[in-house]
Image: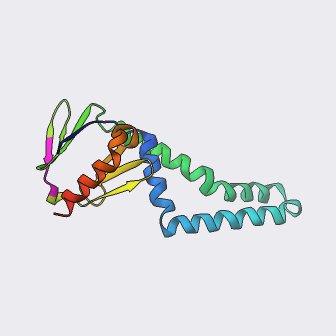
Amino acid sequence: MKYKFTYQTTALDLWKLSMYYTYGSIVGVCNIIFTVAMIILTGNFWGDVNIFLKILLIMGSCLFTVIQPIIVYMRAKKQIAKVSQDMEIGFDDNGIHVKSKNQSSDLKWKSIKGAYKKPSMIVIYSTAKRGFILTNKVLGKQKEEFYDYVISKIKK
């Protein structure tokens, strides 16, 4: 089988991936517990504290619900600025083939570390921290078929 896609990763895609991994780990559980505790503290002590402590309570409640996601999105925008937007990525029995205006690269299936399916994307890792994000928008109706194909090639 052969698949070919125009590689279109946005800052929002990187942000979603980061949020999936943060809230799918023990860090996310700690974030949720902290946020719930801050909301309870804010509700219980709001009338009894001065303005400085009210600001701290609000900031604590917003730390993982507003502030962290904004910071992660800004970091994703910086990362996306470094990625060539005119890339084409192809998959066949020999491996993964990436082409841009200036260069091309081929990866054999045995060098691929894994593939993971998330609700809005498939992530294929070439190293522990680098890989390719293929969104549902790029994959279209062939998402499940493509994911099964990639998994079958990685497991060989």
Residue at image position (82%, 54%) is 51
In the picture, measured across the screen, residue 123 lies left or right of residue 15, that is left
Specify whether residue 30 is in view: yes
Specify whether residue 97 is painted magenta. no
In the picture, measured across the screen, residue 60 lies left or right of residue 24, that is right
The location of residue 17, given as percent across then percent down, is: 43, 51
Relative height, residue 141 to residue 44 (above, below): above
Residue at image position (53%, 64%) is 28
Relative height, residue 153 to residue 8 (above, below): below
The location of residue 46, given as percent across then percent down, is: 84, 60
Image quadrant where one finds the C terminus:
bottom left
Residue at image position (59%, 50%) is 67
Relative height, residue 53 to residue 12 (above, below): below
Q: Give the range drawn in magenta.
A: 105-109
Q: Is the magenta stretch mostly helix, strand or loop?
A: strand
Query: Which is more toward the observer, 24 or 69?
Result: 24
Query: Which is more toward the observer, 130 or 59?
Result: 130
Residue at image position (14%, 38%) is 104
